[in-house]
Image (cartoon, helix red, strand yellow):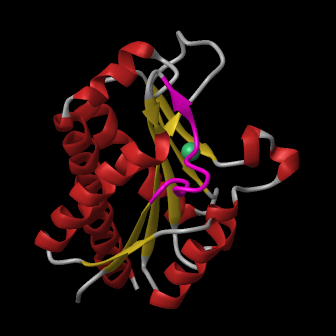
Amino acid sequence: MIHKIAICAGHYPVKPGLQANGFSEHDEAVKVTKHLEKMLAKDGYEVRVTGGKLTDKVASINNFQSEIAIDIHFNGHEDDRVGGIETLHSGFLKSLRLAKCVQKRLVERLNRLNRDTKIGFYQGDPKRGLLYFLAHTHCPAIVTEGLFLSNAEEAMMLETENTHILYATAIAEGINDYFIESLRRSIKETATN
Ligand SMILES: [Zn+2]
């Protein structure tokens, strides 16, 4: 079975997200997405890269009937000492499992502080509800927040293209782990039924 995967770079050219330390969030995320698209195609997945406004991205993902969806971002904080990696999920089991698989690989590959997986609320506030991307995709979805652009040390890592390659490699590995784990679970369930 060929798995369908949708990926997108966070934000879009009109509203490119965080600008810090000379880096633009959207532009850096696009670089990661391009590497990831190639890696996933090579691994035999059917990949759709979506772009434009968030509503358009989500509509395209749902239209594609993707099995999983990943939105690639960089993080920011008013305190420029804050850094590390986190992965946001919807709180539903499959989204959480996918987030855990990808987070583990991101921390291994990028070798920065593990800020763990979290439910992705709008502006981190539970009262404001889930992020649109997590709430409206019809499949398990996650938002990766690899590295803080507001942290000079982490932002400087993006001067070398290898960092984008490592970010993409980690996501590809996390996706493979997720599907292997899903397969193991379904075999176990069949055996116990
Ligand atoms: Zn963002």
Q: Residue at x 33, y 62 (%)?
A: 178
Q: Residue at x 63, y 62 (%)?
A: 134
Residue segment shown in magenta: 9-20
Q: Nearer the viewer, residue 129 or 154?
A: 154
| Horizontal and vertical percent position of residue 42 | 11, 70
Q: Residue at x 21, y 40 (%)?
A: 166
Give the prevailing secondary structure in the magenta stretch: loop
Q: Which residue appears farthest toward the right when viewing the image?
A: 127
Vertical order, 160 against 130 (above or below): above
Q: How many marks?
A: 0
Vertical order, 2 against 18 (above or below): below
| Horizontal and vertical percent position of residue 182 | 34, 70
**Is 126 displayed left or right of 56 in the figure?**
right
Q: Which residue appears farthest toward the left when viewing the image?
A: 42
| Horizontal and vertical percent position of residue 101 | 36, 51
Q: Quadrant of residue 52?
A: bottom right
**Which quadrant of the figure shows ligand 1?**
top right
Q: Quadrant of the N terminus?
A: bottom left
**Is 174 displayed left or right of 132 in the figure?**
left
